[in-house]
Image (cartoon, rainbow, N blue to C red):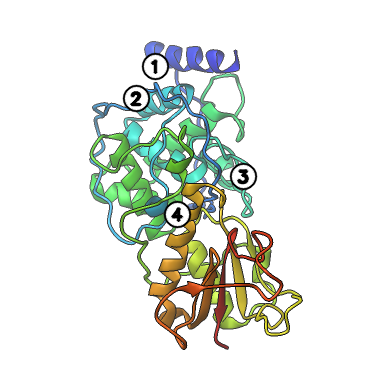
Amino acid sequence: MRWLAVLVVAVAVLLAGVPLGAAALAAAVIAPAVAEQIRQDPCSAYDTATTLSATATAGVALPEWGSPRHQSLTSRAQTIPAPVKQLYVAAAARYHVAWQLLAGIGMAETRHGYNNRTSSAGAQGLMQFMPGTFAAYGVDGNVDGRRDIHNDADSVFSAAHYLVASGVRTGPAGVIKALWAYNRSVSYRNDVLYYAWSYAGRGGAIVSADDPSDCLPLDGDLPGFDGTCPHSRSAAEYGLRPTALRGLRCVKAAFPAIVSMGGRGGRPIATSDHPRGLAVDFMIPRWATGAGNGFGWRVARWVQAHASQLRVKYIIWDAKKWNPTVSGAWRPYRHPLGNTNPTLAHRNHVHVSFHN
């Protein structure tokens, strides 16, 4: 019922031309959240019947995406819940922007509200606004007399308002400028544009997320590696040596679907690199499924391909070990304590040891 009320009000605003209340712009431009670009989640059960046909939108010419991309390399655009798409379309019509651009931001930020928890940077709501930015640019999207950073309608309409204030309607260069204002990251901008073109029917495939295998990239080219390895915001970074720290960050950047990692800590085997802060365990989502195992091999192969840049000593995954000082091939691996469980056999995580 809450969604119905929001949609009725939004349509009424469009038809009647009721002005939306807008906060006065701050004298100095307030930088929006440099939100966590991607916090990967298990697949969500979205409405697969939602139509995703492109809608003609005046005023905005979307530039094509460029390189580098991060999130969109490993996480394809997902179907949009019907109520959320209605908000994108309504806000786009009110502010004369492309609804696909709003959908691209919503996908990159929270998967259209599925993961709209407050980020570690403090960004909130479906479109991930920082409170200070929302105070300056937030609008009353559902016309209930107040601006609520956690209300989906207010969040989407505020995003459209902020994009316009940032110059989105001044051609392709304006779109790039507005996305830079929204999140100061080149890869973020390219991810959003890739998603926007996907929703316009001219980019990558859109997955329904009903099939668990759609959540994990199993084929195609491995992610690129441009040396951009930002802080992972994982507690596993604590105590790692510089090589392992960089390795953790680089793998996480290439495979954001990895949400759990293990770093420095005690191990029962004296030869382990974990106590010295020179090893990282990358826990593989749904490792016991075919999709999870395939994803784990993509991670392992990616690390192997970039072993020299990352100063990799060896890799263990799926009861196999790759040690370039011994052989260029993957060889059977048996833990000193036996392969009696998935952890000892390294079937649920990719272990990477690094040189000092």
Q: Secondary structure at mark 3?
A: helix
Q: CA distance from mark 1 to mark 4?
A: 47 Å
Q: Residues within 10 Å of mark 2 (few under 14, many from 20)?
A: some
Tag shown at residue 93: 2
Quick check: marks 2 and 4 in contact, CB under 8 Å?
A: no
Q: CA distance from mark 1 to mark 2?
A: 8 Å
Give the CA separation, mark 3 to mark 4. 40 Å
Q: Give the number of the disc on residue 14.
A: 1
Q: Residue 233: image x %, image y %?
A: 61, 62
**Disc 4 element:** helix
Mark 1 or mark 4, whichever is nearer to me? 4
Task: Please indicate whether residue 237 sits to the left or right of residue 32 in the image.
Answer: right
Residue 41, disc:
none
Q: Are marks 1 and 2 in contact (CB under 8 Å)?
A: yes
The residue type indicated by label 4 comes to Gly
Choose between 20 and 42: the one closer to the eye: 42
* Label 1–label 3 contact, CB within 8 A: no
On-image quarter of the N terminus: top right
**Cα distance in 3D space between marks 2 and 3:** 25 Å
Say whether disc 1 or disc 3 marks the residue closer to the N-terminus.
1
Q: Residues within 10 Å of mark 4 (few under 14, many from 20)?
A: some
Q: Are marks 2 and 3 in contact (CB under 8 Å)?
A: no
Q: Which residue is mark 4?
A: 294
Q: Position of residue 61 (x, y in %)?
A: 23, 40
* Relative to 199, 133 lies left or right: right
Of residues 151 and 323, the one nearer the viewer is 323
Report whether 39 appears left or right of 240: left
The image shows residue 72, relative to residue 101, as above or below, that is below
Dot 1: element: helix
Q: Would you identify the image quadrant in which residue 319 lies?
A: bottom right
Residue on which disc 3 sits: 131
Q: Mark 1 or mark 2: name the one nearer the start of the chain.
A: 1
